[in-house]
């Protein structure tokens, strides 16, 4: 097992962060931040739409009940 990794030198294992890597880190971080903000905004809009939809369904059901109470069924 030691012969397999014997060609790797310890001095080459260090990571020098240059300007290119820093720019890549900033770009990647900004993309992830924008994606997260978009996800959060979309989630908030979805919750708002769901509440509006439930309110419309509830209002429609209430109107139907009121109309049914005005006109009793003939089966009684």
Image (cartoon, grey):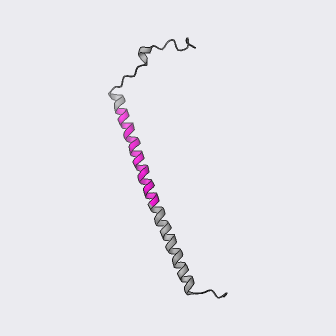
Residue found 36% across the figure and 22% down from its top:
16
Kindly identify the residue that appears in the image at 54 percent across and 75 percent down.
61
Q: Quadrant of the C terminus?
A: bottom right
Task: Pinpoint residue 37: horizontal percent, then vertical percent.
Answer: 39, 48
Residue drawn at the location 54% of the way across and 78% of the way down:
64
From the viewer's perspective, tell me whether residue 20 is left or right of residue 51: left
Could you say where residue 51 lies in the image, as x and y percent from the top left?
47, 64
Magenta-tinted stretch: 23-47
Q: Is the magenta region chiefly helix, strand or loop?
A: helix
Estimate the x, y position of residue 56 in percent, counting from the top left: 48, 70
Image quadrant occupied by the N terminus: top right
Residue 3, horizontal then vertical, whole percent: 55, 11
Relative vertical location of residue 10 with respect to residue 27 in this rendering, above or below: above
Residue 9 position by quadrant: top left
Which residue is pictured at 44% across the width and 14% down the height? 10
Q: How many marks?
A: 0
Q: Classify 52 as above or below 31.
A: below
Residue projecting furthest to the right? 75
Magenta-drawn stretch contains 45 = yes
Q: Quadrant of residue 17?
A: top left
Q: Is residue 38 left or right of residue 60?
A: left
Q: Is residue 56 highlighted in magenta?
A: no
């Amino acid at each position: 097992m030691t012969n397999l990794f014997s060609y790797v030198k310890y001095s080459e294992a260090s990571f020098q962060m240059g300007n290119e890597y820093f720019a890549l880190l900033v770009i990647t971080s900004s993309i992830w931040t924008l994606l997260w903000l978009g996800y959060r905004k979309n989630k908030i809009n979805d919750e708002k739409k769901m509440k509006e939809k439930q309110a419309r369904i509830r209002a429609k059901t209430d109107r139907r009940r009121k109309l049914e109470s005005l006109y009793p069924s003939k089966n009684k």
